[in-house]
Structure formats: structure tokens, C-alpha cells
Amino acid sequence: MKEFIKSNRVTYNLMSFTAFKTLLIFSLLLEAPRSYDDIIDYFKKHDYINETISVDTARVYINSLRMAGCVIEKTTRAEGSKFVLVSHPFELKIQPEQIKAFMKIYKTIIKNISIEELIMLENFLRKLSSCIKSDDFKSSLIKASPLADFDTKLLEDLLACCAKKNQIVLEYNSPRSGIKTIELICEKLDFDNNKLYLYGTGIDYNQETYLQTKRIIKIREIKLHKSENLDIKEIKVLFEVNADVQELQLKDNEKLVSINNGKPLIEAKSSNKFILKQRVLSFGSCCRVLEPTDFRNDIIRTLKNMRAEYTV
């Protein structure tokens, strides 16, 4: 230890070099199949080893892994003569009862954590799943995880853009118009009805917008400067809800004004009229718009049209 503190280098005096090299080969084979040349090249470039080993020496280390219980096979010359780690005695194992308990705990945890924490947890569990040879565990995780089908690297990039309020250009697979580009100023990532959305201000229409994150293909560009003098006109809607105020989950753009005869009076603001309409209609018959008059009349027309569709 004194030698390491003094020189900050690992030497023959500080460890079993044979064991260290054997573990290095084990870690290499965990990542991917390797040939003799791959192993020799890795040892030559390694910070601590930095030496050339022979094929015979590499073979000794590989046979040591086999004696420890690793099943290692070698591909044909046409396939590159690479060593493949088929299995090893250090694999994690999990029982069906443990899977059920694990998933129960997991479902409880994800209800009370942020998007950032959820992404970190997802990355950890994907790595854990790769170490556990259990199809049941993998399938259970896919069913339970709200991020199972997501590219977590893309989500991390979107989160970073939201934190900085970046103006970005996205490639988006629209259900109506197919693949297109959308430019917006990022605000936040959040779930709504178990679907993850990216919220922000759309540049094309100068209004609040939200995109289903699963349909975002990639970030094409992060603008160096934001668009200035955006003419964003906000709409304010006042509506009454026939529901217990304790059961209401207000959005970021909503606030409780008062409670009249047990009915909460809500004020909602948005630059996107469609978002406000969707919110009001989500309450069904429990909601009554009070103002503005033109928005109220628009809701009435929408409800009449919906009714007409069912009476044809």
C-alpha cells in the first residue's frame, strides 16, 4: 500500500499478476468474443501491464478460466478464431419467487421518483438483466418498466436540453404526416396517462406543444441561440369541476381559484387551445366551462358533434 501511495502505480509487488491478467481476459470475454490478437493488443496498450504477451501465455490464462468453471468455445477460422464465453460460475441467478417480489418493489418505487431517477434505474436494471440469464426476469422487467421501449441515451439528452431550455430541432415520426422535423424550446419531460411526453414551445406556431417521446427519432440540432420576439398569445380558461378537490391533480399551468358549493373553480392558462380543450374534455360531464365565452361555445360545439356521431 505504501508503494502504491508513493508511486500511484500497480506493480508485481502489489498483486498476483497472473490472477490480474486472467481477470482481464474474463472481463474482455464478458464484453464480446476475442481472438489471440485482440487479447495481446489489449495487454500491450493496458495502462498497468503495457507489455507484449505470447499466444502460449494467453492460452494459459484462458485455460485457467476453464479450470475455474468457465465454458469457453472457439469459433472457426472463417469466423475469426475467437474465444466465446458461453457461461461461467459467477452468473447471477434469480428464482421465480424473487422475480415477483422484485417487480412488486420496482412498481412501488417508480411511482415516487423523478424522470431522471427513473432513467438511472432503467439503465441499472438493463445492465443487471444482462448479467442474469433468466428470460422470465427480462420479460417481467419489460412488462413493468414504463421505459422498456425507449432509448435512454436519447431521454438523457432531452432531459439535458430541458434543463438548459435549449431550442432544438427534432426528427419526429408523426402519426398523421410521417417523419418530419419539429423545432421547439424544451421545457420538461413528463408522464400523462402513462405516456411520456416532451413539453415545450413550438417555433412554427408560437405556442405550447407536446410530443409523444416514443415518436422522437433523434435530436438533429441544438441551436446556439433561441428565437427572439416570439409572439406567444396565452389563453386563460375558467372552469368548474364537480369533484373532490383532494382527488384533483392540477397541471403546472392550472391553479385553484376557489371552491363554490363544494365544486373547485380552476384557472388554466396555455398558448395552445387544443391542449386546453383536451384537458376540459378529459373531465367528461363533471366539468363546466365558465369563460371565456368563445372557448365555452367551442366546447359546446365539440360535444354536440361528438353526440351526433353516436346518433347517426
Image (cartoon, rainbow, N blue to C red):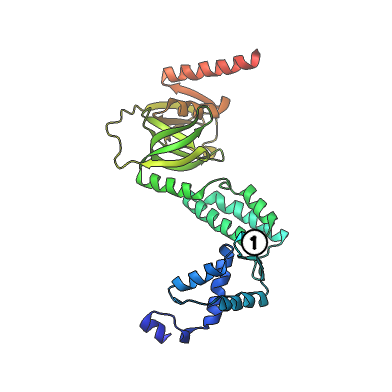
Query: Residue drawn at (50%, 83%), measured in percent from left and top?
Result: 15
Q: Which residue is mark 1?
A: 132
Query: Residue drawn at (47%, 23%), measured in percent from left and top?
Result: 289
Q: Position of residue 251 (x, y in %)?
A: 46, 37
Which amino acid type is shown beneath numbered disc 1? Ile
Q: Residues within 10 Å of mark 1 (few under 14, many from 20)?
A: some
Of residue 211 and residue 276, the one placed in the foreground of this image is 211
Q: Position of residue 243 (x, y in %)?
A: 55, 32
Q: Secondary structure at mark 1?
A: loop
Point out the image quarter for the N terminus: bottom left
Q: Is residue 249 visible?
A: no
Count of all numbered marks drawn on residues in the image: 1
| Picture layout, residue 61 above or below residue 116 | below
Of residue 11 and residue 81, the one placed in the foreground of this image is 81
Of residue 308 and residue 149, the one placed in the foreground of this image is 149
Q: Is residue 31 visible?
A: yes
- Residue 61 found in image quarter: bottom right
